[in-house]
Amino acid sequence: MLQIAPHVKEPIETLKPVVALESTIITHGMPYPANLHTALEVEQVIREAGAVPATIGVINGIIKVGLSEEEITYLSQAKDLHKISLKDLSVAAAKKLSGGTTVSATMFASYKAGIQVFATGGIGGVHRDARESFDVSTDLEALGSIPITVVCAGAKAILDLPATLEYLETKGVLVVGYKTDEFPAFYYGRSGLKLEHSVTTPGELAQIIRERDALEINKAILVGNPPPENMALEKEKVEKLIEAALHEAKAQNIKGKDVTPFLLDYLAKNSQGETLETNIALVKNNAYVGSLIAKALMAAKI
């Protein structure tokens, strides 16, 4: 059920740098045509940085590692696509479903394919109403059990960031700031949540990854990479929008997998597109940093 495209398989086998990308950003994270343009531009960022992009998705029950431009275009426009988490992969395979892979599902497929670095926008985490809803993303469980490196702009700002960090610590997940000593907050870079560990170069991070592997620690390393400073939004403005979005989601009884896409769409519409522009910028930035890490990691193996 796992199909690795030839343009990705050869680099993996010959120890060239490869960076995995998720596809829920295409199917559920952005409207068309921004989703299509962003997906293709992010892949180009990785190529220009000297690595190979491998966008992952599910089409007719097949987990595709290294989607073609035609397949990405299909996922950007098709209707009734599924948001496929790690727990949904077997159902998607059995029922021949199509959809975008979340962080957890993309981590699983990346690891199975032999890809060591995965770049995304922001991870899922503990929701702000988790005390009542028990809504905690499967992403956190995947980070605690799949030993790859995930580059992100922290957890999405719509989540409970302190609780998310505590959950990651409980799961034994190493969180490393890239050129920052704070956990990024997606739309704004500084959350006020201090990180115990940080690095300033891709080489430092590659060494940490190699030591993790040598010790056979079967957990992810989460790299927190702040959004570009010129695209970061004001915390107060974002928080005001988030509170309004959460209130509206509750009023409409939006639950489960539908919450995050609803909130992101609400923020984009009510910020006159500012949050979408920041989202696009930080995804590209994470893809670039992920490429540098993958190159540093492979350089030591050749």
Image (spheres, grey):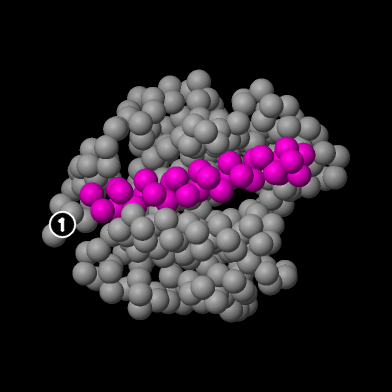
Identify the image quadrant of residue 80. bottom right
Q: Residue at the location (47% across, 49% down)?
A: 284
Estimate the x, y position of residue 7 in percent, counting from the top left. Answer: 35, 75
Identify the image quadrant of residue 134. top right
Above or below for 144 versus 114:
above
Answer left or right for 87 relative to 299. right
Q: Residue at the location (73% across, 27% down)?
A: 240
Answer left or right for 275 relative to 218. right
Task: Tell me if residue 147 can be seen.
Answer: no
For label 1, the crowd category at 10 Å Cα-Cα, with few meaning under 14, some 14 to 19 and many 20 or more, is: few
The three-letter code of the residue at mark 1 reads Lys
Q: Which residues are magenta?
A: 267-296
Q: Residue furthest right?
A: 251
Estimate the x, y position of residue 299 in percent, counting from the top left. Answer: 18, 54
Q: How many labels, in total?
A: 1
Estimate the x, y position of residue 4 in percent, counting from the top left. Answer: 39, 74
Report the front residue among 144 and 11.
Answer: 11
Q: Is residue 132 magenta?
A: no
Above or below for 228 versus 258:
above
Query: The C terminus is located in which quarter?
Result: bottom left
Badge 1 is on which residue?
Answer: 301
Q: Is residue 270 magenta?
A: yes
Q: Residue at the location (25% across, 63% down)?
A: 16
Task: Tell me if residue 43 can be seen.
Answer: yes
Identify the image quadrant of residue 233. top right
Q: Residue at the location (39% across, 49% down)?
A: 288
Provide the secondary structure element on which disc 1 rests. loop
Main secondary structure type of the part rendered in magenta: helix
Above or below for 243 versus 254:
above
Report the front residue among 146 and 22.
Answer: 22
